[in-house]
Image: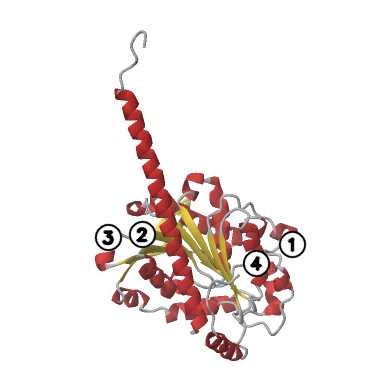
Amino acid sequence: MNTIPLDAATLAEAGRFNRKLAWAPRFRIRNRCMPMLGQALLRVSQVGADARLERGGIRVEQRIAEADGLRVPVRILRPAGSRASAPKALVIDIHGGGWVIGNARMDDRFNAARVQALDAVVVSVDYRLATRTPLREIMDDCLAAARWVLRDGLPEYRTLPVFVVGESAGGHLAAGVLQRLQAWPGLMRRIAGAVLFYGVYDLAGSPSVQAAGPDTLVLDGPGMLAALRLLTPGMSDAERRRAPLSPLYGDLAGMPPAWMAVGDIDPLRDDTLELAQCWREVADVELNLLPDAPHGFIHFPTRMAELALARSHAWMCEQLARHAKVEAEVEAEEESETASLALDAISPAPGPGR
């Protein structure tokens, strides 16, 4: 269940960091005021983000993705210099933040690493937040941005395979986008894989969410069910469990291969475990259940975070290699069929009596 090698020193470091986290406040959603304050502080911390990326050899562009009557801001990170002319993949990134904080800049560190590791172009979606926007409209933003990317919003990259990446609330939104893209099989065929970090896939509360207590790290365990209900006002649990609002209960037919990671002390553990079990019925899934990893662990300065991110990059490179092999086989088959038809066309028809 875990392909990431974790030695004793890595696990000991994770335990020490968790003891520090136990003293930290938990993320909670009880009203609109605190998320709006958090968003303001986040923006202050991001001053100079573009310049930092450009000094690291990454070009930044802000665009508007237009689809389905929606206009969604996106942040595009591209390789600069000699690597800029031949990227190998497109990545659609959907940030986390509990649907109430965050923006496309929030994942700059992770997306810069993806640009470098994959020779990729990354499109990060700046969807509206739940402090002012219903969840279904947030999901519409993400779908519109994905359809813009896949329908030649970036025509110079129309032949590149595409990955959809999401973390936490972004994992929920990414899974929802993939399910809704089934309505456009031609677009879906461009998806080479999904990378999902500890997402929320059951908005009525998976068993581990319902059992979350006050000792939960990072997230406010006892308040998680109330937060999900605040996010989906006026709904019953049965309504919350309808796809694509809860991707766990949707049709996964046609899904691409997936890489998933979650910590075994994350209250969202069961969301990932249950989704992986269902996803495996239709496509390959590499599932990583990491010991002593809390929610949001990839943001922490630990060896475990480094290893998990590195493995996600390696997995995407493996999918690119498989995609290239399949494309080569299809191209060879098409060339063979063309040659056969050409021979048939020039071969003389049999004469009388032959």
> Which residue carries the number 4 mark?
273
Quadrant in the picture for residue 351? top left
Q: Does label 4 or label 1 sit earlier along the sequence?
A: 1
Number of other residues with Cα within 10 Å of mark 3, as a class: few under 14, some 14 to 19, many 20 or more: few
Q: Which mark is residue 88?
A: 2
Give percent across and percent down for residue 181: 53, 51
Give percent across and percent down for residue 301: 48, 84
Q: Residue at x 53, y 74 (%)?
A: 4
Question: What element does badge 1 sit on?
Answer: helix
Dot in front, 2 or 1: 2
Residue 102, above or below 140:
below
- Residue 126 in sight here: no
Residue 209, above or below 191:
below
> Which residue carries the number 3 mark?
85
Q: Does label 4 or label 2 sit earlier along the sequence?
A: 2
| Disc 4/disc 1 C-alpha distance (Å) | 20 Å
Left or right position of 272 against 129? right
Question: What element does badge 3 sit on?
Answer: loop
Amino acid residing under circle 2: Lys
- Residue 292 in sight here: yes
| Disc 3/disc 4 C-alpha distance (Å) | 39 Å
> Which residue carries the number 1 mark?
237
